[in-house]
Amino acid sequence: MTYKLLFVCLGNICRSPSAENIMNYLIEQRGLEGKIICDSAGTSSYHIGASPDRRMQAAAARRGIKLVGQARQFAPSDFETFDLILAMDRSNYRDIVRLDRENRYEDKVRLMCDFASQHRDREVPDPYYGGEAGFDHVINLLLDACDGLLEDVLK
Ligand code: 4NP
């Protein structure tokens, strides 16, 4: 059986593609390919089809992680497709559950930072309008949260 994870942010060019690719990196390290499947999406349509942001790619590369993928928008059908949907911040969380018209999938939607153990952040901050340090922080926070998430999924 495969467990399906969907990471969601606003644009699907910074935080959620990083989470997706970091998770795949950890899955590969553990030899769990095929057991857990990852995807990412944005709540907005702003960047549909775009590659991950260059500044985000650079921050990921500093930790040895390559970012691949093209942005897509979150769709209500994702509630059925995925076992767990990880929102990067509370605004993403609200935008996702708003699309769950009959409140059937709330248990599948969680905040990414709930799985972090080394950081006290409650949200993955939007790095888009900030400097390089913000992008590095996103990668460090996501490495922590993805570690915790992987442990949780394996339980
Ligand atoms: P993301 O970052 O949600 O982590 O992909 C952003 C990307 C684009 C914008 C905002 C946040 N934007 O306003 O275009």
Image (cartoon, rainbow, N blue to C red):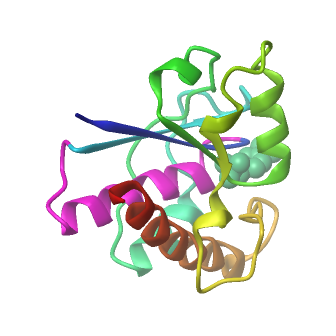
Q: Position of residue 88 (x, y in %)?
A: 69, 54
- Residue beneath the point at 63% across and 71% down: 138
Question: Which residue sits at x=58%, y=23%?
Answer: 79
Tell me if residue 114 comes above or below residue 76 in the rendering.
below
Label count reads 0
| Near-viewer residue (129 or 119) | 119
Residue 136 on the magenta span: no
Compared to residue 150, the image places residue 103 above or below, namely above
- Residue 16 lies in the magenta stretch: yes
Say which quarter of the image contains residue 139.
bottom right
Q: Position of residue 8 (x, y in %)?
A: 62, 42
User: Quick check: 15 left or right of 90?
Assistant: left
Nearest to the observer: residue 139 or residue 66? 139
Q: Residue at x 72, y 32 (%)?
A: 43
Identify whether 4 is placed above or below 99: below
Please state the horizontal and vertical placement of residue 150, each as a whole percent of the image.
Answer: 39, 62
Q: Could you say where residue 101 lies in the image, as x and y percent from the top left? A: 80, 14
Q: For the stretch drawn in magenta, what is the main secondary structure?
A: helix
Q: Residue at x 56, y 63 (%)?
A: 56
Q: Which residues are magenta?
A: 11-34
On screen, residue 155 versus residue 120, left or right, reads: left
On the rendered image, what quadrant is the C terminus found in?
Answer: bottom left
**Is 39 placed left or right of 110 in the picture?**
left
Whether residue 14 can be seen here: no
Is residue 53 in view?
A: yes
